[in-house]
Image: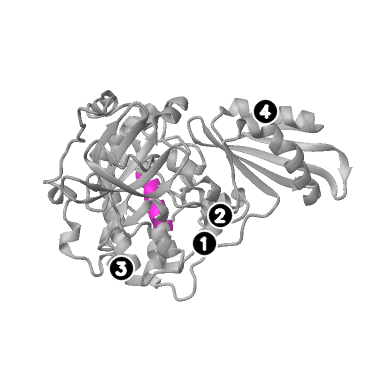
Amino acid sequence: MDNKVNVLMKSYDLGRLLGQGTFAKVYYARSLKTGESMAIKVIDKEKVLRFGLMEQIKREISVMRLVRHPNIVQLFEVMATKTKIYFVMEYAKDSELFSKVAKGRLKEDVARKYFQQLINAVDFCHSRVVYHRDLKPENLLLDENENLKVSDFGLSALAESKHQDGLLHTTCGTPAYVAPEVINRKGYDGVKADIWSCGVILFVLLAGYLSFHDSNLMEMYRKIGQAEFKCPKGFPPEVRRLLLRILDPNPDPRISIANIKENSWFKRGLNSKSTKSATESQKTASSNIDVPSGSCENTAMAAEAKQELVKISNLNAFDLISLFPGFDLSGLFEEPCLKKVARFTSWQPASVIISKLEEVAKHLRLKVSRRDGGLLKLEGMKEGRKGILSIDAEIFELAPSFHLVELKKSCGDTSEYQKMLKEGIRPGLQPIVGAWQTNEKPEQPL
């Protein structure tokens, strides 16, 4: 943001940068009318249009209109100019819950309070037929009173997103928090999937590390599929029993939110006021998103978002992209990925990714064979120091037109694999790569 232009639409005084990603930056701001602190997300319209994501912006606005609750970050206003789109949002002073957990596990009563607020917020979303689908500590903010605020509805889904079978089918979210049925790609209930993520979050709050983690993504998915996790010593027995019901790999018998709320451990210390309907507590809040006039040159986009819900099937992956350098977020808790695994994102269709992988393999004199489920096997023609080098390439759809590709050495010498990756594979794939994963600590997310 240009330092010379620190007053937006004659309404907000822009301050320091709070965070940034591929498509947007978030600034601290102060309302010139009320003096209230705000957070303003500034989205680059040129990039959004280039990637065909304008409809997804409208959809995110529509979702945030529906979910006005004390434990959900509120969207106050949407504005737009020729080059930017502005989301004026509630400011959470104490930033992410993740920053607290990164310092170590929380005390039981503190963790329970945050879990109670999370469950209440998610329950409200479900009552409005909104499924978050990317619940994790990084998307849970804390205000100045230490109250939890759910944020980042970019990957959320509405009832219109369901297929004829009544289920959601897009595989999305952050791997360590994704439910088994989402990974299986056979359709899933958004309510059940969100409940699973809440269970993983509860484990992280009390243990200080992830319930499911492995440097090999497929091994981590196997652990998730079998609900293979181990509670640390001193873990509250009541929570252990509750987690076994939440982290049930079979979604059908998985505990419901209504039953979670009836759990004795969950109810402990609850204030009756906190369990009231959010509708009551939000009666004074505006039910519409304000759209300013005058200097706003392209208010048509924001005005259209005030109409009925936009029915689209695509997803907004802004924050997932911005966090990609630390995509395997468990790296902040555990050892970094082994050198035999490399991952990158791509906005290209799966068919283009496969064609490019085959092209690069041919150039490097690697034999390619296709397997089911988007898996390719690349094998050398000659034996190396430890036999024939073999590389598995697997493609995961995180959202429509947005894929994660994992390259993993399955046989052969690691140093030979690393050399081929550095000198041949990475340069050859660069035209289709959005970003390579690194083991560096991620930037502050939006």
Q: Quote the CA–CA distance across marks 2 and 1.
A: 7 Å
Marked residue nearer the N-terminal end (3 or 1)? 1
- Disc 4 or disc 2, which is closer to the eye? 4
* Membership of 296 in magenta stretch: no
Amino acid under disc 1: Phe
**Do the residues under discs 2 and 1 have CB atoms within 8 angstroms?**
yes
Q: Identify the residue position indicated by label 2 in the image.
A: 223
Q: Quote the CA–CA distance across marks 3 and 4.
A: 53 Å
* Front residue of 191 and 404: 404
Q: Quote the CA–CA distance across marks 4 and 1.
A: 38 Å
Instruction: Classify mark 3: helix, strand or loop.
Output: helix
> Neighbour class for label 4 at 10 Å: few (<14), some, many (≥20)?
some
> Neighbour class for label 3 at 10 Å: few (<14), some, many (≥20)?
some
Q: Identify the residue position indicated by label 3 in the image.
A: 265
Residue 356 tag number: 4
* Front residue of 189 and 84: 84
Q: Quote the CA–CA distance across marks 3 and 1.
A: 21 Å
Amino acid under disc 4: Lys
Amino acid under disc 3: Trp
